[in-house]
Amino acid sequence: MTPRVHPSSVVEPGARIGDNVTIGPFCHIGAKVGLGRDVEIVSHVAISGDVHIGAGTKIYPFAAIGAPAQDLKSVGEEGRVVIGVGCVIREGVTINAGTKAGGAVTTVGDRCALLAYSHIAHDCRLGDRVILANNVALGGHVQLGDQVVIGGGSALHQHVRIGAHSFVAGLSGVEADAPPFMLIGGNRAHLFGLNIVGLGRCGFSPERIARLKRAYRALYSRHVPTPLDERLELARQLPDDDGDIARLIVFLREPSDRPAMAPRASRRP
């Protein structure tokens, strides 16, 4: 079906507009933008630079996508933004382009929900089905695994990594990496335990959650502080039918620019 473009909107020559796209009033679509099939842009949206938006994504008023990074070191650089299929991008969301220092691309996975006034800075990488609640701010180079949920008003320090299936409570200040499957919160965020409710909603069986509980105890619940390598070895020896414990261990062994988060009562790994 032919795209429908409101006469008050500007679509620059060169823009790639897929079938059945709807562009409402007072939008600006740049020359390097690609919109997949069935994308709906409600109104008053600015999409500039090298941006690809996947099929079926819906964008609400006053979103700004593809603007240069808010990084004074990258003035004049031209990065990209790639957004997956079936996303919901609500009012006032901002997504900045990547920089050379971070691979030159900011990516948002499939079926993500970016709620009002959330901000995704340059070179962030979001997995699939990520939810950012209202007013969440991601610094540059942040990485979020699949099905991460960030509560409203939270801020994430640049280069922070949050593993898959983790939940960050609202109004949190996150300055350290959090492994997969965790419940996170606090003014300077720390681990509260496993994201039990979220894991159940994602279809994790009671037995699978029980295995993760044993791994959590091995990593964080020992009374006498021990080096991280020793705790990782304890976790590695546990039954791991689903590979979840292996994913925890890989995450904690990966090099990172940020420290690893721990429960408040524990020494940081």
Image (cartoon, rainbow, N blue to C red):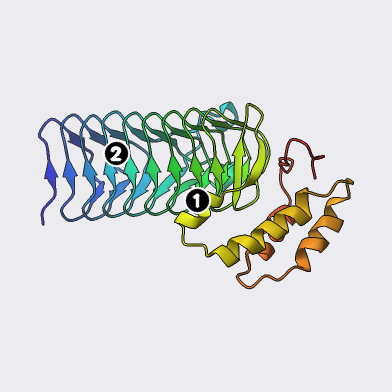
Q: In the rendered structure, which amino acid carries the disc numbered 2?
A: Gly
The answer to whether 204 is drawn above or below residue 113 in the figure is below
Q: Position of residue 183 (x, y in %)?
A: 59, 44
Q: Position of residue 190 (x, y in %)?
A: 68, 37
What residue would you read off at disc 2?
30
The answer to whether 152 is drawn above or below residue 179 in the figure is above
Horizontal arrangement in the rendering, residue 86 relative to residue 255 (left or right)? left
What residue would you read off at disc 1?
198
What's the distance in space between the residues labelled 2 and 1, CA to CA?
39 Å
Circle 2 SS class = loop
Circle 1 SS class = helix
Q: Quadrant of the N terminus?
A: bottom left
Q: Quadrant of the C terminus?
A: top right
The answer to whether 45 is drawn above or below residue 85 in the figure is above
Q: Position of residue 49 (x, y in %)?
A: 37, 39
Q: Residue at x 43, y 32 (%)?
A: 118
Neighbour tally class for label 2: few under 14, some 14-19, many 20 plus, Cα within 10 Å? many
